[in-house]
Amino acid sequence: MSQQNGIVEYFKRLEHQHFLELISYVRALEKDYGSDCMEVLASAKYELTYKQWAELARSQEQNGIAKLFELLWEGAGPLLEYEVLYRDSEEIQLRVTKCFWADTFREMGAAGIGKTLYCDDEHASASGFNPRIRLTRSKTLMEGDDCCDHCYLLEE
């Protein structure tokens, strides 16, 4: 096994453990406080992610779509399989056909938690990095679709 494969497998094991803990916490909160707690968690996660990506943007020389794509997607190669369907300076369209996060949350029977806290959180990454960048998506692997269809658009 190469060193990179070893690192990826180690990361996957750590994330798997993290997901088990997260799912346990969410289910305990839902049991005691009802399903509304998921909205509170999603809001808190969105706010944190937005702040993190806004801070990251401040450390970059540029914060356009190309830089967001580089930071968010290009380094995730071993964890995702995707193709770029369209790309210019104001728009990037992706078709994701394999996703470690979707596979793992679905295997754990927690796709709803994964979608809310991970898939939906991608909107915060985009708008935090640049408030003019919008992410749209009509399909997700997490929800059982054949792909995720991401479209990042730089609004005027």
Image (tube, rainbow, N blue to C red):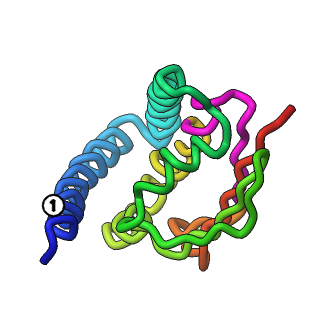
Please report the bounds of the magenta region as a residue range.
Answer: 125-137
Q: Residue 47: in sight, yes or no?
A: no
Q: Position of residue 93 (x, y in %)?
A: 71, 61
Dividing the image into 4 quarters, which one contains the C terminus? Answer: top right
Image point (45%, 62%), residue name? 111
Q: Position of residue 13 (x, y in %)?
A: 17, 61
Residue 120: % across, % down: 56, 47
| Residue at the farthest front position | 61
Q: Which residue is mark 1?
A: 10
**For residue 4, which quarter of the picture?**
bottom left
Give the x, y percent position of residue 75.
Answer: 41, 55
User: Which SS class for mark 1?
Assistant: helix
Residue at image point 74% right, 31% down: 132
Side of 1 where 79 appears, left or right: right
| Placement of 71 over or under 102, stated as above or below | above
Regarding residue 84, the answer to whether it shows in the image is yes
Q: Is residue 156 magenta?
A: no
- Which image quadrant is residue 61 in? top right
Asked if residue 48 lies left or right of residue 3, the reply is right
Depth check, front residue: 106 or 65: 65
Q: Which quadrant of the rendered structure holds the N terminus?
A: bottom left
Circle 1 crowding by C-alpha within 10 Å: few under 14, some 14–19, many from 20: few
Instruction: Write the residue at 65% across / 67% down.
Output: 84
Residue 80: image quadrant is bottom left
Which amino acid, by three-letter code, is at mark 1? Tyr
- Magenta-drawn stretch contains 136: yes
User: Furthest-right residue in view?
Assistant: 156
Report the residue at 55% width, 70% height from top. Answer: 82
